[in-house]
Image (spheres, rainbow, N blue to C red):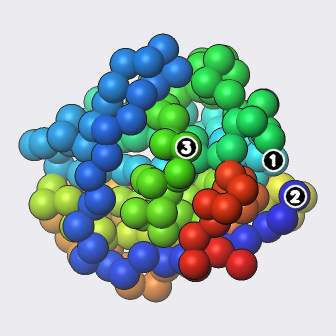
Amino acid sequence: MVAVNSTMLPLGTVAPDFSLPDPSGALHSLAEADGAPATVVMFMSNHCPYVKHLGREVGLLTQRWRAKGVAVFGVMSNDTDAYPDDAPDKMAAAARGWGWDFPYLVDTDDHAVAKAYRAACTPDFYVFDAALRLAYRGQFDGSRPGNDAPVTGADLKAAVEAVLAGAPVDDDQWPSMGCNIKWRPGQAPDYFG
């Protein structure tokens, strides 16, 4: 396990478009966020200890947000040949176990969506406003495996609630930390390393 920080994509960036399959093969796209007051995009992994650490709380928070019309997407970008625990059949089981009712999607073989978002780790979180402009990127909260801080989702929750209220999101944002995305051979982006 290599712990890395997120790249902190510039605030105000327009959400990169995507159309990706879920584990059953059904396609989902960013267009599903049309009309949503906020959109949350998360880069996740089934096997990463950092994701396992907060998986259930992600499920609880995203269920509440989706009930308020927030669009939520999870993207799994790891090389599933080298990391079969992240394969689509295991993605569906992990999502069910954590109570994830949002689309949990499989990135392309060349990691196109992760690269478009400059995602570097799992978990990696992005919150966009109603105009799909980036309002927050960074950590779920200050909890990490083994640091004994409670898993609350405080940072992500504050960002989503601010966007829903039409209020500015605090610019003091801390990078997410987690397992590096497992790039396929020859596919690691220039910002990785």
In the rendered structure, are the residues bearing label 1 and label 2 in contact, judged by CB atoms less than 8 Å apart?
yes
Of 70 and 80, nearer the camera is 80
Structural crowding at the residue carrying mark 2, measured as other residues with C-alpha within 10 Å and reported as few (<14), some (14–19) or many (≥20): few
**In front of the other: label 1 or label 2?**
2
State the residue position of label 1: 49
Structural crowding at the residue carrying mark 1, measured as other residues with C-alpha within 10 Å and reported as few (<14), some (14–19) or many (≥20): some
- Residue 180 is situated, as x and y percent measured from the top left of the image, at 72, 62
Residue 121 visible in the current orientation? no
On screen, residue 178 above or below 30: below
On screen, residue 44 above or below 138: above
Q: Residue at x 43, y 53 (%)?
A: 113
Q: Residue at x 42, y 28 (%)?
A: 21
Q: Residue at x 32, y 79 (%)?
A: 11
| Residue 1, label in figure | 2
Residue 111 visible in the current orientation? yes
Q: Cα distance, mark 2 to mark 3?
A: 21 Å
| Mark 2, secondary structure of its residue | loop
Of 71 and 166, nearer the camera is 71
Mark 2 vs mark 3: which is more N-terminal?
2
| Mark 3, secondary structure of its residue | loop
Q: Amino acid at mark 1?
A: Pro
On screen, residue 161 above or below 174: above
Q: Amino acid at mark 3?
A: Asp
| Residue 109, label in figure | 3
Dividing the image into 4 quarters, which one contains the C terminus?
Answer: bottom right
Q: Amino acid at mark 2?
A: Met
| Mark 1, secondary structure of its residue | helix
Of 52 and 191, nearer the camera is 191
| Number of numbered discs overlaid on the protein picture | 3
Dividing the image into 4 quarters, which one contains the N terminus?
Answer: bottom right
- Residue 128 is situated, as x and y percent measured from the top left of the image, at 28, 60
Q: Cα distance, mark 3 to mark 1?
A: 23 Å
